[in-house]
Amino acid sequence: MIKKSPDVDVYIAQFSGETRQRLEQVRKLVHESSPDALEAVSYGLVGYKRNGKPLVYFGGFENHIGFYATPNGHMAFANDFAKYKQGKGSVQLPMDKPLPTDLIKRVIEYRNQQTEK
């Protein structure tokens, strides 16, 4: 089971309303799908490692949640991410649209396979 990081609690607590709710929702998805992942604040984002390898990262912004599934996660889900604004290795999940929890869960499960020992 993931040990919740006090640093991540502090990171999420700086946000309010819908942003905080979405961050907690993504955190819960990671915890459910990757109970052995290590949680920390890294690169100014909430990050998870599994077997010493990056799993996923996410962060709160004014108008979106940033989701980072490392390069192969983004390549594997390029068609699904195509409808969202993207940056190098990131996808912006806008606050004015429903959070794509099924897609996030599928990406985490894919990254679980990529981070097997």
Image (cartoon, rainbow, N blue to C red):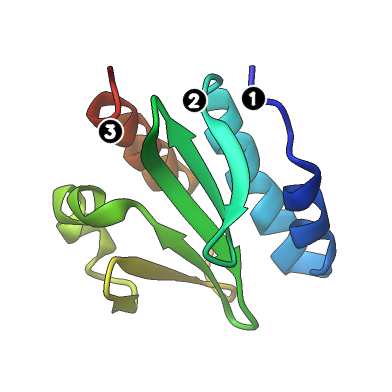
Q: Residue furthest front?
A: 52
- Disc number at residue 34? 2
- Vertical placement of residue 108 versus 51, above or below: below
Query: What is the secondary structure assignment of the residue under circle 2?
Result: loop
Q: Is residue 94 left or right of residue 61?
A: left
On the image, the x and y values in percent for residue 79 come to: 16, 59
Q: Residue at x 49, y 25 (%)?
A: 34
- Mark positioned earlier in the residue sequence (1 or 3): 1
Q: Residues within 10 Å of mark 2 (few under 14, many from 20)?
A: many
Is the N terminus in the top left, top right, bottom left or bottom right quadrant? top right
The secondary structure type at the circle numbered 3 is: helix
Query: Horizontal and vertical percent for residue 88?
Result: 27, 74
Of residues 96 and 72, which is closer to you in this image?
A: 72
* Residue 108: mark in rendering: none
Q: Looking at the picture, which amino acid does disc 2 mark?
A: Ser
Residue 30 x %, y %? 54, 35
Residue shown at 18% from the left, 49% from the top: 72
| Furthest residue toward bottom | 62
Vertical order, 46 against 29 (above or below):
below
Q: Which of the two discs, 1 and 2, labels the residue nearer the N terminus?
A: 1
Q: Nearer the viewer, mark 1 or mark 3?
A: 1
Gap in angstroms between the C-alphas marked 1 and 3:
18 Å
C-alpha span from label 1 to label 2: 8 Å
Q: Is residue 90 left or right of residue 95?
A: left
Instruction: Give the residue pinned by disc 3.
Output: 110
Element carrying mark 1: loop
Q: CB under 8 Å between callouts 1 and 2? A: yes
Q: Is residue 99 visible?
A: no
Q: Which residue is mark 1?
A: 2
